[in-house]
Amino acid sequence: MAEPLLRVEKLVRRFGGIIATDNVSLEVASGELHAIIGPNGAGKTTLISQLTGHLAPHSGSVSLAGRDITYLPAYRRCALGLARSFQITSLLLDFTAADNVALAAQAHAGTSFRFFANARKEKDLRDAAHAALDRVGLAHRADVLVSKLSHGERRQIELAVALASRPKLLLLDEPMAGLGVTESQGMVKLLQELRKEVSIVLVEHDMPAVFALADRISVLVYGRVIASGDPDSIRANEDVKRAYLGDQHVVTHHG
Amino acid sequence: MKSFTVSKAVTALMLAGLVLLPLYSQASGNIFILTLFTRIIILALAAASLNLIMGFGGMMSFGHAAYLGIGGYAVGMLAQEGVGSGWIQFPVALAASAIYALVIGALSLRTRGVYFIMITLAFAQMAYYVASGLARYGGDDGLTVYKRSDFSGLINLSNRTQFYYLCLACLLGVIFLIWRIVNSRFGLVVQGLRSNEQRMQAIGFPAKRYQLVCFVISGTMCGLAGALLANNTDFVSPAVMYWTRSGDLMVMVILGGMGTLFGPVMGAVVFLLLEEFLSQITEYWALIMGPLLLLIVLFGRGGIMGMLGRANRG
């Protein structure tokens, strides 16, 4: 196999006596949608934070397209093509939807130390913003303040912001969190489209969504990867069933 | 201007008033009002510069008066040493303020919130005590500027009207620059950082670099106000850097409306006029002024500009 897009090797992160990330190794190939699942408290968000650079690991390494990024700050990783969405929506509430997305495009289009020209009149940035908004189906809400948008719409803006930076790899931290049934279905459809263009790491609780979307799934329990493989082999895996004891039927019957 | 609003009308009225004031002063022979408004305009310039970091950048600096002192002392000390040319004094004032801002900003921006407020305050107080210790330049008693900055006869700073218009031009120039900056790429990044720093980092902006540059621009602008102020009072003393003066500037910004272009100007006008007239009525003027400011801040969210904005909506 060629060099994977994302390679995580023996990552360890402790909080006091608790090992939140315990020797995690995984690989995401280019073009793949790799889902990370696990019960609550399995360390999914801790793992994601180390991938995005918001948290430093105690040992191990993370590399993106062959380049070691283990200790790069978040903004540098972003420049290398790593974009993320937040589990809890994190947007600029007092800016319009278009401004939010245009800023992400701006971060990847030359220097932002320009002090005089009106940035809102830069056609490239506005076009990129509208294209990304259109992609998530929110073009008609471009000029609305984010604080006036619904929760579902904000989840979509999160995605548009991530897309506007033209990432190689998209880290999605529970994009369905708090969405209604219809909204979730819309999001799954959207992700089906996006995966054709960009590699995705998806952390998600919504099992039907995960099994419908993922090429490969890694199961995280107590900070350890207990299984990694395609959806069918994960569904059949005994360890996974045991870990999800209560949710066993969810794993076996959906998808 | 896209549409008529109450706040735009009031702003336009205020600007027209400021432009025409010297004519009124000449016609009525009221020299005092011209002197008073020269001071108001200079402090409005300082407040506008503070608003750039506080209102647009979300950086609550409690040491902004330091730049008034640095700009002022640059003029005063050079004048004392026989360098009377404004072409030298003003650039030195701006450069000194920029360097101070760069150093203080680089150290202060490692902190956030209350710590940022306290550390900027602490540095300004240090500047205050350093100035008090400058025995050669008057120490505690301050330094008299015997001759105003000389701009090779191009403009005469000792002429009240000319000096007034110079200050007004500086104020409008700085507000024009701020207007351009806040709508530029750089300005959007700084405002984005005020709104959600984590998000801005995640989309690829190194926060501190942008905030530091903004801090330096703001400090340099305030240094200009300091240089003008020393010319206005023919005097500079450590008192202009005292923390209460920094507080006054913050009050002007909040009173007028943080994050608005002309709010700080309005805040400075209202604050200093109130101070002037209340202190003529009673020596306990602060007792009236304090509660009055509290009421405006408590019930007029967004300051005067905020209230005018609401008046427009009915």
Image (tube, rainbow, N blue to C red):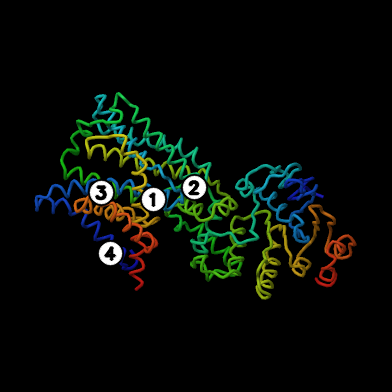
Element at badge 1? helix
**Residue that label 4 marks:** B9
- Marks 2/4: CA distance? 37 Å
Q: Chain of mark 1?
A: B
Is the same chain shared between marks 2 and 4? yes
Total numbered labels placed on residues in the image: 4
In-front residue for pair B207/B249: B249
Mark closer to the observer (1, 4): 1
Labels 2 and 3: the sequence-earlier one:
3
Mark 2 and mark 4 lie on one chain; the one further toward the N terminus is 4
| Image mark 3: chain | B
Q: Are marks 3 and 4 on the same chain?
A: yes
N-term mark: 1 or 3: 3
Amino acid type of the residue tagged 4 in the rendering: Ala
Residue B22 horizontal side relative to residue A206, left or right: left
What residue is pinned by disc 1?
B51
Q: Is residue A108 visible?
A: no
**Is residue B285 in sight in this rendering?**
yes
Q: Residue at x 55, y 48 (%)?
A: B205
